[in-house]
Image: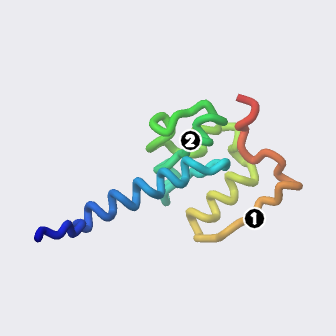
Amino acid sequence: METNIPTLHGLAEELLRIGTSAANGINAGIVIIDSFGLVWFWNRWLEEKSGLTAEAAAGKPFLKLFPELNNSRLASAIDAALKHGLTSLLSQSLNKAPLPLFNK
């Protein structure tokens, strides 16, 4: 009897597939940026609302994709997170639309 034991690489690929599917299935934007501010993941919701495909966003500096965010509260929060590991809460009452998604 042959057993089908998944490899570590196979498990990692399956987890990535499941995570990507879940992130693309929700009704909210998800972007993952690295410590240099480069986009690693851009979900389907963001593709639809921003007009940028995941492929076009991948590897690009997040703030270069939205230059109008320079000197914004969101840009400051991202900078604090990347440089100092700080979390931020951007209240929707003060930041109605932190990303210019619905104007595109």
Which residue is under mark 2?
Answer: 44
Locate residue 47: give its quadrant.
Answer: top right
In-front residue for pair 77/99: 99
Identify whether 102 is placed above or below 71. above
Disc 1 residue type (three-letter): Leu
> At x 47% / y 57%, what residue is drawn?
19
Identify whether 18 is placed above or below 83. above
Across and down, in percent, residue 43 comes to 55, 45
Q: Does residue 22 appear to the left or right of 70 in the view shown?
A: left
> At x 22% / y 66%, what residue is drawn?
7
Q: CA distance from mark 2 to mark 1?
A: 24 Å
> At x 26% / y 68%, what residue is drawn?
8
Q: Does residue 98 appear to the left or right of 57 in the view shown?
A: right
SS for dot 2: helix
Answer with mark 2 or mark 1, whichever residue precedes in sequence: 2
> At x 66% / y 36%, what residue is drawn?
49
Tell me the crowding category of disc 1: few under 14, some 14 to 19, or many 20 or more residues within 10 angstroms, Cα based. Answer: few
- Image quadrant where one finds the N terminus: bottom left
SS for dot 1: loop
Q: Residue furthest right?
A: 93
Across and down, in percent, residue 99 comes to 71, 43
Disc 2 residue type (three-letter): Arg
Locate residue 73: give its quadrant.
Answer: bottom right
Across and down, in percent, residue 51 comes to 61, 30
* Colour logic: rainbow
In-front residue for pair 1/15: 1
Tell me the crowding category of disc 2: few under 14, some 14 to 19, or many 20 or more residues within 10 angstroms, Cα based. Answer: many
In-front residue for pair 82/104: 104
Which residue is under mark 1?
Answer: 89
Identify whether 80 is placed above or below 64. below
Q: Does residue 63 appear to the left or right of 68 in the view shown?
A: left
